[in-house]
Image (tube, rainbow, N blue to C red):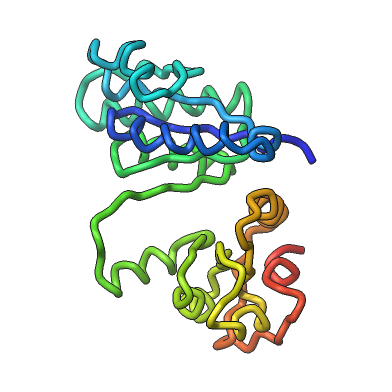
Amino acid sequence: MSEIQIDLIAGARPNFMKIAPIIDAIRANPEAAHRLSFRLVHTGQHYDRNMSGSFFEELGVPEPDINLGAGGGTQAEQAAAIMMGYEKVLQERRSDLCLVVGDVTSTMACAIVARKMGVDEANLLTTEPMGYLEFNYLVKHAKAVLTDSGGITEETTVMGVPCMTLRDNTERPETITVGTSELIGRIQRRLVRLWRSCFPASGRRVASPRNGMARRPSGLWKHYCP
């Protein structure tokens, strides 16, 4: 299996604080480090001198591989500079996944570019606790859900969203039988393998039981991927 190329996008100080543990997790796991290759892309949204080498050293984050140098200006000007810069990066060397964090201008700009160029994108949100309807809105519009919850698999089944459960067992075994959820356990390489096997495919959504999906004991991936 070839390496999965990931772009880690950051532009504001809070972004780098969220990116730091992701990099730590990749480095700490030999299997992940072998299978995943990342490049840290600094959009330049925050461009003051405090975002210098010492800042990255204090966080334990490597110096960015790429700096788009978006600089100042209005939000629209910054977004345009980031989008043009990141588009050029992907044209020169395409990645498999664009990983953005938070909800700043850099997040929006790079996610749009990735989507337009056919690169998978994922957003890790660090949010305040939200209401049931708000949460289900996010689930409904997600490409997939990773969870250690026993109940969210019910919502994803009804909505037709593939769900990977980071547990060894589940209180909702019917979701496994139906084929909308998969138990991943705590084996990280299995998560990487299943994720990669699924998302380079056609991207069609899982049919939900409401739409008459047949039972598939072989699991989510047999149904979701060709």
From the viewer's perspective, tell me whether residue 35 is left or right of residue 7.
right
Q: Quadrant of residue 97?
A: top right
Is residue 37 placed above or below 127 in the rendered structure? Answer: above
* Residue extending farthest left: 74
Which quarter of the rendered picture does the N terminus lie within? top right
Q: Residue at x 69, y 54 (%)?
A: 190
Q: Residue at x 45, y 74 (%)?
A: 152
Q: Where residue 95 sits in the image (x, y, percent)?
A: 61, 33
Is residue 49 placed above or below 215 in the rendered structure? Answer: above
Q: Quadrant of residue 221?
A: bottom right
Q: Residue at x 23, y 19 (%)?
A: 72
From the viewer's perspective, tell me whether residue 176 is left or right of residue 25.
right
Is 123 in front, or is 19?
19
Is 103 in front, or is 112?
103
Is residue 38 placed above or below 170 in the rendered structure? Answer: above
Q: Where residue 62 sits in the image (x, y, percent)?
A: 46, 19
Which quarter of the rendered picture does the C terminus lie within? bottom right
* Residue extending farthest right: 1
